[in-house]
Image (tube, helix red, strand yellow):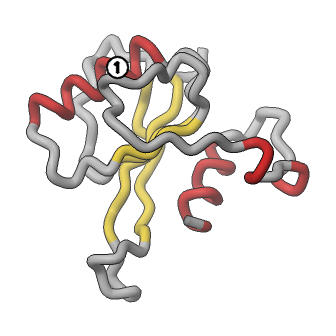
Amino acid sequence: AEELRSAALALCSGRAVDAQELDPSEDVDLLHGDLLEADISEATHIYVSSLCFAESTLHEVAFKLDGEAHNLVAAASLQPLPLPRSSSLEPAGEIVLDMSWTKSSIGARAFLYRRRQS
């Protein structure tokens, strides 16, 4: 979790974000459910556990993030998202995360995305 938090904060560079002032117990709402059914219009950070998603579902996720997550700062997905060229999102790197199914020295790759800079 700390690796993902650090990567998300790094994507906020240039924005008025002070990690020391953020209190996850007050400033974070965790939602668990079907991303394709959820209201993500106010979401700023999204993690998609997409490891077993079909290609068609990845396209739906990319379309939803691009079109509905207007406040999105950073997103992470366990599979790369097939973003169209016209997408307002762009790849922002990759990180390795510890997962319950991986050895701590191996981890699982997560793909990071952010809004394109205007």
Q: For residue 36, what is the image quadrant?
A: top left
Q: Residue furthest right?
A: 21
| Residue type at tag 1 | Lys
Q: How many marks?
A: 1
Report the side of 21 relative to 12 (left or right). Answer: right
Q: Which is nearer the eye, 85 or 33?
A: 33
Report the side of 88 relative to 77 (left or right). Answer: right
Q: Quadrant of the C terminus?
A: top right
Q: Quadrant of the N terminus?
A: bottom right
Q: Relative to residue 52, is residue 115 depicted above or below?
A: above
Q: At 41% from the left edge and 55% from the top edge, which residue is drawn?
A: 94
Q: Position of residue 58 (x, y in %)?
A: 20, 34
Q: Position of residue 79 (x, y in %)?
A: 25, 49
Q: Relative to residue 56, is residue 77 depicted above or below?
A: below
Q: Relative to residue 45, is residue 97 depicted above or below?
A: below
Q: At 10% from the left edge and 36% from the top edge, which residue is drawn?
A: 55
Q: Secondary structure at mark 1?
A: helix
Neighbor class of circle 1 (other Cα within 10 Å; few <14, some 14-19, many 20+) is some
Q: Which is nearer the eye, 114 or 69?
A: 69
Q: For residue 102, what is the image quadrant?
A: bottom left
Report the side of 59 relative to 55 (left or right). Answer: right
Q: Position of residue 107 (x, y in %)?
A: 35, 76
Q: Position of residue 85 (x, y in %)?
A: 29, 17
Q: Which residue was labeled with disc 1? A: 64
Q: At 37% from the left edge and 72% from the top edge, which residue is drawn?
A: 99
